[in-house]
Amino acid sequence: MNLFPRFYGARLLGVRRFILIVLSVMAGTASITFAIIAANDFYKAILATAAGSRAHVVVHLPTSRVEDVGDVSARVLKVAGVAQCEPALRFEGNFQFEVKSRDGDLEFADVMSTEVVGYEFTNAKRKDLPVAFDKVYSKANRKSSAGMQPLDIMCNPEAGDVGRAILSDTLAVRLFRRPRPSGNNFDVTLPLSADGSGRNVTFHARTAGAYLVNALGPSSERRDPIYIRLEELQKALGLEGRVNSLDVRLLDPGAAGAVRKLIASQVPEAVKVVSWTEPEADSLAFLSLLNFGVLSAVAIVGGTAAFSLCAILFMVVADKLKEIAVVSALGATPRLIQTMFVLIGARIGSLGSILGVCGGIVLSWGLSSRQAELMSNFYNRADDWIEIPWLQVSIAGLSMALLCSLATILPCFWSLRADPTRLLAQE
Amino acid sequence: MSDTIVSCTGIEKRFTTLSERGEESNLTILDGIDFSLKRGYFTAIVGSSGCGKSTLLNIIGMLDRQSAGVLEIEGITIGPESRSAEELCRMRNQKIGFVFQNHNLLPEMTAVQNIMIPLLIRGDGKKSAQARAEELMAELFTKEEIDSGVCNRPPAKMSGGQCQRVSVARALSCQPALILADEPTGSLDEKSAMLVFDMLHKIQRRHSLSVIMVTHDQAQARKVDRVVRLAGGRLNEE
């Protein structure tokens, strides 16, 4: 390979100009990387709290015995994209509930309606838990509210005596105290009937952190589920051996909308089929907006970086036109001069992109850690490391590098107009 | 190998000019130049300012194209439109060395790096190009100058004479068959001018180079093998 383009190209731009352009490309790439990571984080949060905690698609059936839904279940399983289909029992109603602390040192407890929360119930684990309660949380401990909240309970009869209950969109128990290594133990008591007058079922929760939602949420790797006997739950609901829905998990949660339509075509018209994306329509619309924003940012920032490189190269060419005429007189072919410009762009683009991607990751990580640190009193976040969508970040970085190379085309063609006979005769 | 290194047959150069009234007129600078140069000869082209000396040199150096006529360099024929720009660049790099009136060294590079440029364009490796550049520096500069670090100085930190000597070294770097020098001492004081000319002459003798030099200096013209005068678009022996 001819060394002239590299040798002369490195000197043509000058160190200061080179650093300036690399920094501008780096800043652009860093901001794009940060935006991509933030958008990805947001999407993961939606997936984890919405699609992850519930079925991706729910087929609402009339309440019937488990064995009677087998036919519909088999048809749903044949639909492309369906990974799993389980009969489930759902129940919705308003409940009065209370929080009791086993450790006795709660500073503040608040029952609130905030996020999607997933709880699981099983017979096995329940047996291992101590039954006695240390203390019933009282008004003296500043209990702020215990409101009537809608509750969606679901269990899976096919899994033997292992049941599952999902408290969706409604219940979060926020415990204001610092995390401690032994974890926090508390109980949530729910009267399982629509009017709140039914029998009470108490769930025991043990969390390592201060915030139950994060400790128990499906996004957390340290899930510490609450368990209860399925029969007990069914009895409490008065629906022994009955199910009223199919819980469908998909291979790709993102395809829930399309698969919902396919499933709807396989079941009777009266049956309501709902995908997880419907209740999350607002969040997903916001995500689309965010993605559009990121895309626009990529276009604007990338365009600005490419334009500034192009403008600086134009200035360089204007400044060095005579020198280019000299090297042309010394035998540098137009192709060598073109290669030199492309190499300048590629060098700036690759260096700026790599530094920018690293900068964006460090920035995202720094802000994520800072957020976790600021909110450590409320959230016990062990997963403060961000998740990087490498493919998108790589595409953004490569696009910036490519843009920088393309930005050299116009100045390059302009430089090829350098006429040695005219420029060197101007002495 | 032919004894003739450059041969010009009926070389013409015309420009179309536009008068203030908007009327086009043809200006003939070179009007049928017939000229040949034997290998190893030092030739001076003299003539009044604006007579077309530099234009002829540019045509011989393939920087400019003739309007008519045929140029031959080492047996390779170059007509008005017969070769592509890429081909001309390659031939220029391999067969011709230029020494400009104003040294035209690249300001951000050192003396050695400036000499390396034609070699790198040719495709030489960095180490061999540097070795050749240092060899030429040793030939054209005194030991004291080399020891003072002139090799690693940019043009801004060298005298005019030193710059012009680097320019000569750059012209010699690819061991060309022909050196074209357009008033190489025109921008130097008398002493430096004589120093540079003597050095060029010495180098030409030592390496049996063919040199065409445009000059106004009669003293220098008297020292070369052959002098031709350009007047009225035509070339005459003196």
Image: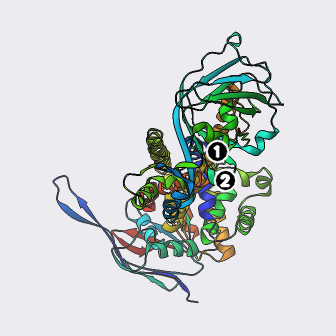
Tell me if residue B92 comes above or below residue A15 in the rendering. below
x and y percent of residue B159 in the render?
Answer: 65, 48
Query: Measuring 59% from the left and 29% from the top, which residue is drawn there?
Result: A198
Mark 1 Cα within 10 Å, few/some/many (few <14, many 20+)?
many
Q: Amino acid at mark 1?
A: Arg
State if disc 1 and disc 2 touch (CB < 8 Å): yes
The image quarter in which residue B28 lies: bottom left
x and y percent of residue A205 in the render?
Answer: 73, 33
Q: Is residue B48 left or right of residue A50?
A: left
Q: Quadrant of the N terminus of chain A?
A: bottom right
Query: Measuring 44% from the left and 38% from the top, which residue is drawn there?
Result: A282
Identify which residue, A288 or A351, lies in the foreground: A288
Residue A333 in view (yes/no): no
Q: Which residue is mark 1?
A: A164
Number of marks in the image? Answer: 2
The image quarter in which residue B51 lies: bottom left
Q: Which residue is mark 2?
A: A159
